[in-house]
Image (cartoon, rainbow, N blue to C red):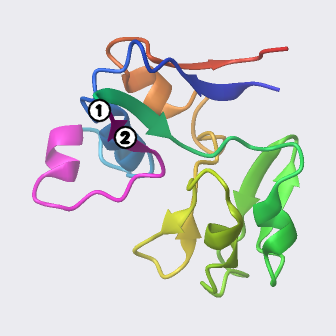
């Protein structure tokens, strides 16, 4: 299964992946107009430690602790992608506590959010398309 991988040697820390992620769910055609004067809440985030920048997003684990810990069954796996059923999520934050990678966060809608590989609206994740340095890739690895 294809997953998002990050090469921290190539990451510039520009945060464009965050903007492309936030923009991917919008109906607007112009990113500058859509994101003007709003605080973005992307499903991927750039962290920096000791001068090294890297992207944090869901790793779509084979045995995900977040799915096992979800008390309402809002998190599920389909074709290797961990997805959130927002109608079932009660925002108890158990999945946030269970994720060892810090890849699940709060959303403005009152539920949790995480990367779902843009499966509902694109062939390739928006963060991958928007990375100017090719630090984020979408590929299958052994």
Q: Which of marks 1 and 2 precedes in the sequence? A: 1
Q: Relative to the observer, which residue lies in front, 54 or 131? A: 54
- The residue wearing badge 2 is 46
Pick the quarter of the image with the C terminus.
top right
The magenta region covers 31-50
| Quadrant position of residue 97 | bottom right
In the visual, does 92 lie left or right of 37?
Answer: right
Label 2 packing within 10 angstroms: few (<14), some (14-19), many (20+): some
Q: Position of residue 46 (x, y in %)?
A: 37, 40
Left or right: 113 in relation to 99: left
Could you tell me which secondary element the residue under label 2 belongs to? strand
- Given residues 51 and 140, the one toward you in this image is 51
Instruction: Please tell me which residue is depicted at 78% across the width and 15% down the height of the picture.
Output: 141
Query: Where, by quadrant of the figure, is residue 88 drawn?
Result: bottom right
Left or right: 21 in relation to 81: left
- Displayed quadrant of residue 31: top left
Marking on residue 86:
none
The residue under the point 12% across, 52% down is 36
- Percent of width and height locating residue 18: 35, 42
Whether residue 91 is in magenta: the answer is no
As measured in the structure, the alpha-carbon distance from the residue carrying label 2 to the one carrying label 1 is: 9 Å
Between residue 57 and residue 49, name the one nearer to us.
49
Contact check, label 2 and label 1, Cβ < 8 Å: no
The residue beneath circle 1 is 16
């Amino acid at each position: 299964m294809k997953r998002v991988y990050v090469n921290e040697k190539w990451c510039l820390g520009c945060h464009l992946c965050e903007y492309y992620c936030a923009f991917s769910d919008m109906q607007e055609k112009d990113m500058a107009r859509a994101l003007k004067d709003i605080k973005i809440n992307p499903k991927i985030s750039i962290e920096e430690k000791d001068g090294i920048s890297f992207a944090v997003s869901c790793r779509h684990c084979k045995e995900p602790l977040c799915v096992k810990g979800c008390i309402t069954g809002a998190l599920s796996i389909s074709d290797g992608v961990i997805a959130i059923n927002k109608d079932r999520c009660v925002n108890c934050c158990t999945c946030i506590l269970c994720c060892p990678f810090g890849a699940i966060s709060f959303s403005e809608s009152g539920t949790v959010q995480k990367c779902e590989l843009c499966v509902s609206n694109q062939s390739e994740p928006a963060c991958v398309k928007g990375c100017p340095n090719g630090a984020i890739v979408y590929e299958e690895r052994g």
